[in-house]
Image: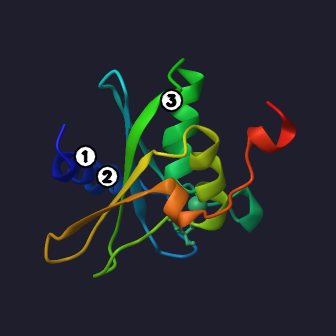
Amino acid sequence: MLERELFQKAVQAKENAYAPYSNFKVGAALLTKDGKIYTGCNVECASFGGTNCAERTAIFKAISEGSKDFEAIAIASDNDTFTFPCGICRQVIFEFGKDIKIIVGDKDGKIKVVPIKELLPHGFSGQDLNK
Ligand SMILES: O=c1ccn([C@H]2C[C@H](O)[C@@H](CO)O2)c(=O)[nH]1
Ligand SMILES: [Zn+2]
């Protein structure tokens, strides 16, 4: 699966976003090492703390379906430029692999790929708990 194709899946997943409060729709597409794709969107809540980001929706779907070896996650919003994952999502992505590739795109179709360890330098992980 090409990075560009995975990004397009994230663009499609964005259509299902439930974002009536922020109006900021986000889609994510998660590629597993065995070639499966799990998509996700942000789901907001009137009690704002109940909101879940697109990235974590995709990851939690995958985990709950028995997949936990991830290759890459693509993220799309309606912004003109790249939307990188928030801090909470960076930590959750890092939980499942320090080399997972983050794929973002801009309005001109430019794709950028960055490993999660670059977005979360010195990240806390299970290793710190001797796990
Ligand atoms: O990478 C991001 C950044 C933000 N959001 C969502 C959370 C909230 O619904 C809205 C505004 O922060 O966008 C995501 O899903 N992913
Ligand atoms: Zn997030």
The amino acid type found where label 2 is placed reads: Ala
Residue at the location (14% across, 77% down)? Answer: 108
Residue at the location (67% across, 59% down)? Answer: 88
Q: Report the side of 41 relative to 124 (left or right).
A: left
SS class, disc 1: helix
Counting residues from the N terminus, which is met first, the one under dot 3 or under dot 2?
2
Percent of width and height locating residue 59: 53, 39
> Between residues 121 and 111, which one lies in front from this camera angle?
121
SS class, disc 3: helix
Q: Badge 3 local density, few (<14 within 10 Å), some, or many (20+)?
A: many
Pointer 1 residue:
6
Mark 1 vs mark 2, CA separation in Å: 7 Å
SS class, disc 2: helix
- Outermost top residue: 66
Pointer 2 residue:
10
Image quarter of the C terminus:
top right
Q: Report the side of 90 relative to 33 (left or right).
A: right
Q: Are the residues flagged by discs 1 and 2 in contact, CB closer than 8 Å?
A: yes
Ligand 1 image-quadrant field: bottom right
Q: Are the residues flagged by discs 3 and 2 in contact, CB closer than 8 Å?
A: no
Q: Is residue 101 above or below residue 114?
A: above
Counting residues from the N terminus, which is met first, the one under dot 3 or under dot 1?
1
Q: Is residue 29 visible?
A: no
Percent of width and height locating residue 44: 60, 60
Mark 3 vs mark 1, CA separation in Å: 15 Å
Pointer 3 residue:
62
Image quarter of the N terminus:
top left
